[in-house]
Image (cartoon, helix red, strand yellow):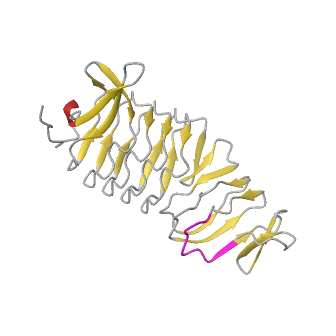
Amino acid sequence: MPTLPVTSASLPTPPNAFDWRLDADGRVVLQKLRDSSAVEVVVPAEIDGRPVVAIADAAFAYTGLLTSITLPESVEKIGANAFFRCVSLTDVALPNALREIGSSAFDLCESLRSLRLPNALETLAPDAFNRCASLTELLVSPGNTRFRSVDGVLFDADGKTLLRCPPGKSGAYVVPSGAERIAPGAFDGCALLTSGELPASIQTFDAQAFRDCPALTQLQVAPENKNFRAVDGVLDSVNGKTLAR
């Protein structure tokens, strides 16, 4: 059967626009979008009467003209590299039932500016949004119990671990008071970040937290911090014996 062109986001995209399979429970996993020239896609909630519950690894990868993707409420998982290098993607509607976003799922989605993480999300790969140069905010639905957003930056639910700063964040960034840890790769690829300020509450951060931040010229730390100090914008241990960053 020929693949129907994807021309409008007003109606679900025809099922034969996708390659798909059934999981162990007889539910649909979308394997691949056949039309690489698709612009707007609305994933159907069912195919052959079976619910669509997952987007497989690399299912939409390299769909360079894709600007909009809408997933049905039945989708629970987005696989690794699912939207890799979808460079025109600006509009993503994630369903409330979504529980997992895999590694590099939105890597190199250079036009994506904002994303709201849904209530049910439990697992988010640290590198899910790497190299999203225009992404300036990661928002979290109010009912989510695993994550929170503070000024568009992603934290764990209690606000003690800074998980991911959107790569498009620019200028100076002040880590809010109460944060205790900065996760690996939290600021990875924040090419427009010029300075960072750590509060007294910070206890630890990963050595790769500020990787690939070419405009970052200084790190400051609150004088009351018992673990780190800043000297001429360089971060070291409070006793001056360990260069931290």
Q: Quadrant of the C terminus?
A: bottom right
* Residue 73: x %, y % from top left: 39, 29
Residue 16, picture quadrant: top left
* Residue 131: x %, y % from top left: 45, 60
Residue 177 seen in the current view: yes
* Residue 76: x %, y % from top left: 44, 31
Drawn side of residue 92 relative to residue 164, left or right: left
Q: Is residue 74 magenta?
A: no
Drawn side of residue 152 relative to residue 220, left or right: left
Residue 74, picture quadrant: top left
Q: How many marks?
A: 0
Q: Nearer the viewer, residue 119 or 83?
A: 83
Q: Which residue reaches farthest right?
A: 239
Residue 72, picture quadrant: top left
Q: Residue at x 59, y 42 (%)?
A: 147
Q: Residue at x 52, y 52 (%)?
A: 127
Q: Which residue reaches farthest bottom?
A: 232
22 w.r.t. 65: above or below = above
Drawn side of residue 233 relative to residue 132, left or right: right
Q: Quadrant of the N terminus?
A: top left
Q: Nearer the viewer, residue 98 or 179?
A: 98
Q: Residue at x 20, y 50 (%)?
A: 37
Q: Is residue 212 magenta?
A: yes
78 w.r.t. 23: above or below = below
* Residue 2: x %, y % from top left: 12, 35
User: What segment is highlighted magenta in the picture?
Assistant: 210-219
194 w.r.t. 153: above or below = below
Q: Give the prevailing secondary structure in the magenta stretch.
A: loop
Residue 202 seen in the current view: no
Q: Residue at x 73, y 52 (%)?
A: 178
